[in-house]
Amino acid sequence: MASAKLRRRTVTDDKFLAVEKTRTIKPADFKSHLKFSEFSQADFIELLCLMEAELQAKDILLKAILSGEVGTALPLSNLLNDFECQIVSNEKHATEEDEEVWLGEPSAHLTHVVAYHQVVTEQMQTIVNSLQKQHQQVLKHLSEEKHRHAVDRAQGDDVTYMLEKEREKLQHQIEV
């Protein structure tokens, strides 16, 4: 089957499972590793069905996540359930090699997701820390400006009061 061929190739080609390479796969890389002439029409139909099933599963998962019905432990339990269902369904006609390939992929992908999440968490933490420092500096600057403005206003009020007194004094001298 085509899916077994693809799984074997992704396991033998570490390029597809390497953490640093997973986000940089280009169509040219994919073409060099797969010869489409080796696949029959039935294989292509199976691939198309698998892709459609993946898209439907992704849509269902996104809807569940967006609606808030998914807990934090649910993805791992679903992954383990998928793993157990795959073993039961493939016991009759799967070889040990295919089972090893199938078992390795979810755990490698999960490891990659966890590592990527840790990196992103660290990056976000540094961003949050720098934003907190900037926020504190802005608050300090604003409080200093507020204090200076209050001092300037008080000095302005004193000058205005002195000018008013001087004007009244001069006006009194003119009347006399």
Image (cartoon, rainbow, N blue to C red):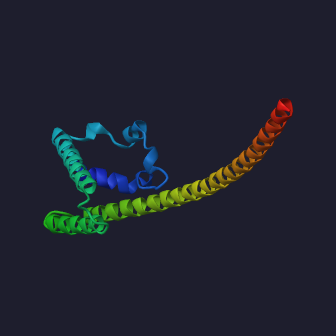
Question: Of 95 and 10, which appears nearest the observer?
Answer: 10
Locate residue 111: give its quadrant: bottom left
| Image spot of residue 86 (x, y percent) | 20, 64
Residue at 73% x, 49% y: name it.
154
Q: Residue furthest front?
A: 176
Does residue 4 appear to the left or right of 22 in the view shown? left
Does residue 57 appear to the left or right of 112 in the view shown? left
Q: How many circles with numbers are drawn on the protein? A: 0
Residue at 84% x, 34% y: name it.
170
Q: Is residue 12 above or below residue 73?
A: above
| Image spot of residue 93 (x, y percent) | 15, 63
Question: Of 176 and 95, which appears nearest the observer?
Answer: 176
Residue at 50% x, 59% y: name it.
119
Question: Of 149 and 94, which appears nearest the observer?
Answer: 149
| Image spot of residue 16 (x, y percent) | 41, 51
Locate residue 95: give its quadrant: bottom left
Q: Is residue 122 above or below residue 1?
A: below
Does residue 80 appear to the left or right of 17 in the view shown? left
Q: Residue furthest top?
A: 174
Question: Of 54 and 13, which appears nearest the observer?
Answer: 54
Q: Is residue 12 above or below residue 162?
A: below
Rendered-image quadrant of the C terminus: top right
| Image spot of residue 137 (x, y percent) | 66, 54
Does residue 120 appear to the left or right of 62 in the view shown? right
